[in-house]
Each structure stands twice: as structure tokens, then as C-alpha cells.
Image (cartoon, grey):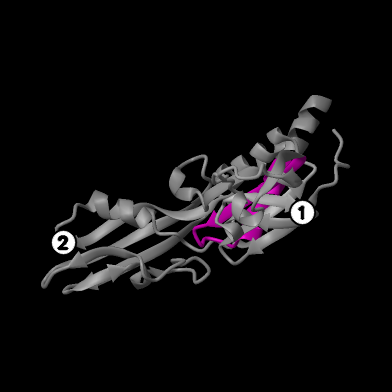
Amino acid sequence: MSTDTEFEVEFIERDERSARFLVRGLTPAFANGIRRAMVADVPTFSVDTVRFVENSSVMFDEMIGLRLGLVPLTTPLAEFEPGDIVTLALDVEGPATAYSGDIETSDPMVAPADDDIPIIELKDGQRLELEADAVLESGKSHAKHQGGIAVGYRHLQRVEVVGDAPEFEDEEPRILRGVIEDDGELVPTEAFDNDLTNRYPGKELDIEDVPGAFVFHVETDGSFDVTDLVSHAVESINDRAAELESKVAL
């Protein structure tokens, strides 16, 4: 199996939790494989088991457990292995709202990614005390372990002006979403409100997909940053390819 394929990667925009980047040299199948790996193969910590000490709120234990399972937890992937467990605890007495920031952890590396996620509002005299186990698993086992909450891709599209529009012809909006390549420049369509007539008024245009070029738009839930998500997804694909190669060679 050849590993000599070269890919060109260019970030269009990036912050800690979201990014848009262009990859050249991909097939549609490989682009989809990267997307699936980001969704299903990169593990995150998520609450799996909850032990209630006291729950005098109006909400059933199962509903609170569901909400806890949806709280993103920071996941330093280099420090843990799938199946590892970290213990969490929550003890809040009303009148108060229990937030994700009230959760205490046995390991400071694994903690709520956001402190302001509401869990339950407690009235006067109500109390919620519990202990929970957060397990490191992948999204293929359960959706709550998917750290990539929005992962998609589109073809890069090339726009070329081929002439002037017919005179006196009413110009209709020409909506296009994603990223275009205009004379070598990468331009997100949001820059012109996704309407090509705003960028090229009065022009006839030729639009085509750029072969082998895909623009990925990725967002994480805060379990890790975008760089970690993408790099571990690619590592997962490499590991599976190496495993297949070894089995075929037997």
C-alpha cells in the first residue's frame, strides 16, 4: 500500500473550537473517510455511570444522568487510553441552579469544557448530590462521545468571469455557499452574502468544482481543539490502513 501521496493543506480560518481548511489531492471517498473518522474515531470523555446520594429535585435520576452525559469534558488524548475512567462529583443545594462549573473532578485534566451549562434549577430545600464515572470512548460507541459536533466538507469551486451579462437583463440572485477560488484567491462566500451577483455585478460566470480540492468546516464541543481532532482522525485512518496492509500481507 503506497504512503507517498502528498496533500496540500491551507487554513482559511481557525480558532480554538472551529476551523475551515482546504485540502488538495483528495478523492471524494478519502474526504468522506476523514469526516467519518473525526465524528466516530476520536474518543472523548463522557459521563457513563451516575451514583445518586440525594436527589430531592423535581427531575428523575435518569433525566439528570442524560444531561450530565451531554456536558463536554476536556480530553487530553495524549494522556489517556480508551476505557480510562475519571470520577466526577456534584453537590448543590437550593435555591440555586446547578451548572457544569459546579462539577468537581478527580483529575484536573478532565473537567467541564464550559462552566455555564445549566443542569437543573433547585428550589429551596432541594438538593442534588451525586458521583459519576466519565469514560473515554469513541463516537462509534455512542453519540455523546463525539467531540466533532459539526463536521462537513464541500468541493472548492472555481469562479471565472467569461464576459458581460446581456444588457438590460434583470439580474437574479445567484446563491453559492462555501469557498470559491478566484484567480488563486480563496474567498468564503459569506464575504459577499453568498450571492455571486454582489461580487461580480453584471458579469457572466463559469463555475466548476476544482478536482481533488475539498473545504472542510469543523467544530468541536470543547473536549479538545480542532488541531487535535483532525490530527487524531488522520492517525486513526493510518492505523486502520496499516492493520489492513498487515492482514493482506499474511
Q: Is residue 132 above or below residue 202?
A: below
Q: Nearer the viewer, residue 191 or 132?
A: 191
User: Can the viewer see residue 137 in this picture?
Assistant: yes
x and y, in percent, of residue 95 in the image? 16, 74
x and y, in percent, of residue 198 in the image? 60, 55
Magenta region:
211-238
Q: Nearer the viewer, residue 230 or 181?
A: 181
Position of the C terminus, as image quadrant, is: top right
Q: Amino acid at mark 1?
A: Val
Tell me which label, 1 or 2, sits earlier in the chain: 1
Q: CA distance from mark 1 to mark 2?
A: 51 Å
Residue that appears at 64% across and 38% down: 32
x and y, in percent, of residue 107 in the image? 49, 69
Residue that appears at 45% across and 59% down: 72
Mark 2, residue position? 57
Q: Nearer the viewer, residue 98 or 130?
A: 98
